[in-house]
Amino acid sequence: MTSAPLDQALVDQALVDQALVEEASKKSGLVWARGTVPAERDRPERDRPERDRPERDRPERDRPGQALWHVWHDGAVCVVGDGPGEQPLPDLVDGRGALVTVRSKDKGGRLVTWPAKVVELAPESPEWEAAVAELKGKRLNAPDAETMPRRWARECRVLRLEPAGAAAELPADSGAAPPVPTPAVTRRPVPEALPRLLWKRKRRR
């Protein structure tokens, strides 16, 4: 006798989750995504492909998500990366799962985490063209805006992170992580006197 109201409550919650995921993903400029544990995690590590091996000295469940700029298109988060000069897409493997966390645009805190299926789009397919048409308008400071889609087709992956279930429990940890290695660093420490010099110049103005 109680199954019908219960089923309706589940349907209602699913609709609420779907609306929250879509609205939050549309408004936020970033999402945090990480691949979930592959089905063959119990295989000996030496037998797994290199890209499927977990980070050393860190349980998979504790690995932080990768911050990704994105667009929401046709019911999914779309991202481009893994090529020279583009954002990395670690652990996001075609056909596998991922967890996506979206922040609140207003307060900046984590708003919702949802499971996704990773779908890699074939370069220059209709789905790829549609996603790239949206992504290229969001790519900031591209040195080759006119030819960028051709470069993405040659060198990058375009992924759809498609919602694949109810919203998950938000992570309990802070999500803090060391910066990823990058050549974009200063060559030497800032001189000790520089902050004082800049402060004096500011006061004179």
Image (spheres, grey):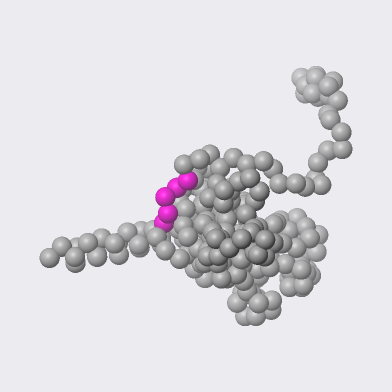
In the rendered image, residue 53 lying in the magenta stretch gets the answer no
Nearer to me, 1 or 131:
1
- Horizontal side of residue 109 vs 142, given as left or right: left
Judged left or right of residue 147, residue 104 is left
Whether 13 is drawn above or below 107: the answer is below
Residue 126 sits above or below residue 112 on the image: below
Q: Residue at x 47, y 60 (%)?
A: 115
Region of the chain picked out in magenta, as a range: 167-171
Location of residue 10 (image quadrant): bottom left
Image quadrant occupied by the C terminus: top right
Q: Measured along the vertical axis of the image, is residue 146 above or below residue 87?
A: below
Residue at horizontal 46%, vertical 42%?
A: 172
Q: Position of residue 151 (x, y in %)?
A: 78, 69
Residue at (45% x, 66% y) in the render: 164
Q: Is residue 118 visible?
A: yes
Say which quarter of the image contains residue 91: bottom right
Q: How many numbered discs, if any? A: 0
Q: Nearer the viewer, residue 133 or 98?
A: 98
On screen, residue 103 above or below 92: above
Residue 74, horizontal then vertical, whole percent: 52, 70
State the image coordinates of residue 186 (x, y, percent, origin top left): 83, 38
Q: Is residue 99 left or right of residue 67?
A: left
Q: What's the residue at 32%, 59% (across, down)?
A: 13
Image quarter of the N terminus:
bottom left
Locate residue 82, reporting x and y percent: 72, 62
Image position of 44 (left or right of 173): right
Most common SS among magenta residues: loop
One can see residue 135 in this view = no
Towards the viewer: 23 or 123: 123
